[in-house]
Image (tube, coloured by chain):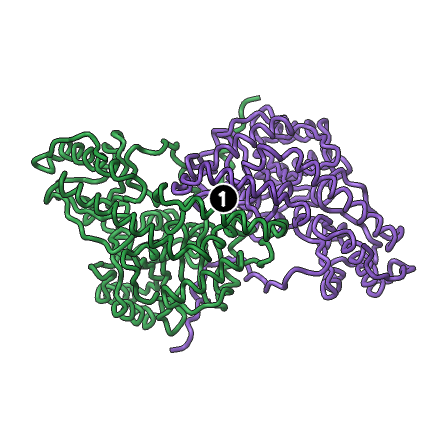
Chain colours: A purple, B green
Amino acid sequence: MPAFDFTPLLAPDLPPPAPKYGGFPKFNFVGGHNDPSLIPVDALIAAAQAVIRREGPTLATYSMSSGPLGYRPLREFLAAKMKRHASIDCSPDDVLMVSGSQQGLDMINTLLLAPGDTVLVERDSYGGMLSRYTRLKVKTVGVDLDDDGMNPQALEKALADLKAKGVKPKYIYLIPTVQNPTGSIMSEARRLAILKIAESHGVPIFEDECYSDLIWNGQRPPAFYALTKTDNVIHLGSFSKSIAPAVRIGYIVCKPSLMPQIRALKTDGGVGALDQMIIAEFCLNHFHDHVARLSKGLRGKLEVLMESLSERFGTAAEFGDPPGGIFLWIKLPDVVDTQKLAQVALAEGVALNPGPEWSTDKTYAKSRLRLCFANPDHATIRAGVAKLAEVCQREFGVPVRSANIEAARS
Amino acid sequence: MPAFDFTPLLAPDLPPPAPKYGGFPKFNFVGGHNDPSLIPVDALIAAAQAVIRREGPTLATYSMSSGPLGYRPLREFLAAKMKRHASIDCSPDDVLMVSGSQQGLDMINTLLLAPGDTVLVERDSYGGMLSRYTRLKVKTVGVDLDDDGMNPQALEKALADLKAKGVKPKYIYLIPTVQNPTGSIMSEARRLAILKIAESHGVPIFEDECYSDLIWNGQRPPAFYALTKTDNVIHLGSFSKSIAPAVRIGYIVCKPSLMPQIRALKTDGGVGALDQMIIAEFCLNHFHDHVARLSKGLRGKLEVLMESLSERFGTAAEFGDPPGGIFLWIKLPDVVDTQKLAQVALAEGVALNPGPEWSTDKTYAKSRLRLCFANPDHATIRAGVAKLAEVCQREFGVPVRSANIEAARS
């Protein structure tokens, strides 16, 4: 018999098939990968030993002995950490563990969005979320950003424009603490201004804090979730950036009135128990020191990246000095089309995020790009930037005076 | 300001909010929980130590060094195990790791089903799947079962009836190897007959094998996936029953032509790395012996359950002697309404699955129930059955001559 053809049976409106996996690029400046040398191997082994010894038999029960929200010691750690770090006053029962913040994004979108809906986002925002909106047929309204994050006047205007058209947006998606891709941290005053506008329009805020643990000086303002007086904020966090992305642990924080409806969308039987148990055990003893050490290492890599860019691109590459995170948002001369650059560079082993994929304004972002610096080591960062400058010079004539391309230096 | 009300913003057609978690019942005969005393604690600790020591730094990369299908050593183990155990000849690249078979169910349903679609299922089938169909507004056609699983004549008739109505079902959902809830294992001849009918109607088979490792004598026929000549089978498996349900590791096996479309539906960044790595390391050395030991323990519990039922219910409880699994499907006298029994029993600490939730034929299943025996220990099984008989006698007058209710015996 001929091979079976599933095509006529597929559900309508599926996402396009996943592209073939091309392997890990030589110069990987994309994705939320972290520094392999900063994975706390010894402490994770000790944590695994202790927690499996003590609680291993609970693996026989779905959700261990913790109920459907996830491993309780981890939720307790998170409640305490968010209190200390982000001024969030919540109970462990307000925290739902999810399989990375990506599952959290999908769940909150399922909760609130239907095709044709509208959301407000920072003009430049997480590409994985923007592509989700496209797939969901949700309209995005990009709101201008400055060094302090989303601009309140621009938000007020966008909301007024929508209101005039009879459109009620479903939420405002914000990455206020280490913004993706700009790296900015929104001040408390700005947060209060944004919150006031959102509340006056009856629009909730979806706050994504998945980078907020990685701040060079450790200082940050209270989360939107901590500042709201009306409980119009849903908060999302993750251990992907602060410990390890392969470990799939994120968390949604919301008020008790909303939790049962969100829980109903978690139909996969919980988050991996060994991931949760080992990370919880690790965090109780080591989270603070680990994040300090990791941040120091990442800051060092950012400096190497900025130096390399200055050396190879000169004034052709404009960028700020972000206070935290794992990426740098860069402006190249207007002649450069970063989507084209990304294609050509990838063929030579350099992976980067072209600006238009990280922005609602494709024209504004045409010559911008995002480079993630957490994964490659110092020598690889230097060699990758050199290679990128070489490709960019060849394709677009900038940087004008191409520096000599040296071999990678350690 | 008043508290924010999310209700008007919720997406349409959400599932109902999750019920309040009531804690773990005293006599827990529901769910896929396993035996805490049979969790291989020492071997898991050794596996965690070895694999984190060797590969811990790869946690810094999404999907470790394994690409988007999941941890490669685990997929290699699975390909070899499925070859040996189920005659499945597949490459590790045909295996996609998912967060428990529950995520696999959701993904395959998303792949193929839209509201109004029709699927064929065994008349008695997994309650979690039947409730998914209800939520998805998918119509189910139940096909009669006998001791050898789905009846081919009944399947042929169901397909002919649908064809006459112009309905093309999306798939046939089968649990052929330790059927849920009947526990039967379909013979190879029956599989071939079912496959022939499915192929002649151009209908694929969705084969769920999440209990197939737990067989008392270790013997089983080839999987449908191994027997198809047309590649019309999607295969689903899990480690929840063979190792631990809290560890969220399932897998989808499909042909290369379908994999990119299925992969596109896995948007959560992969399966927990520590779960995958530790279980893979454990399995390479211990899977076979562990499953043999676990099966022996479960067989012992089944015997205690069958003895207790005979002792407490006499001939009022009819059941077979399943060749594997973690549950027993029981018929009580017609006067018993097991949905009502479940409610009353739960109030006294006995949790059970009423038949109508595990069947497409609510009348047929009215006096039937499913009891899972893997989690409670021998004494708890005995005491739970005694309590159940007491409740059943009081509510429905059966068993007629109620045995004395003794204290739980160890």
- Is residue A271 in view? no
Provide the secondary structure element on which disc 1 rests: helix
Count every numbered label the image shows and give the total. Answer: 1
B216 lies left or right of A156: left
Q: Report crowding for label 1: few under 14, some 14 to 19, many 20 or more residues within 10 A (C-alpha).
A: many
- Quadrant location of the N terminus of chain A? bottom left
- Is residue B7 in view? yes
Circle 1 sits on which residue?
A: A274
Question: Which amino acid, by three-letter code, is at mark 1?
Answer: Leu
- For residue B313, which quarter of the picture? top left
Tell me residue B388's x, y (percent): 20, 35
Q: Residue furthest right?
A: A401
- Quadrant location of the C terminus of chain A? bottom right
- In this rendering, the answer to whether B284 lies above or below A220 is below
Q: Nearer the viewer, residue B246 or A402?
A: B246
Tell me residue A207's x, y (percent): 61, 36
- In this rendering, the answer to whether B34 lies above or below A148 is below
Chain for disc number 1:
A
Q: Nearer the viewer, residue B104 or B408?
A: B408
Tell me residue A231's x, y (percent): 56, 27
Q: Residue furthest left?
A: B401
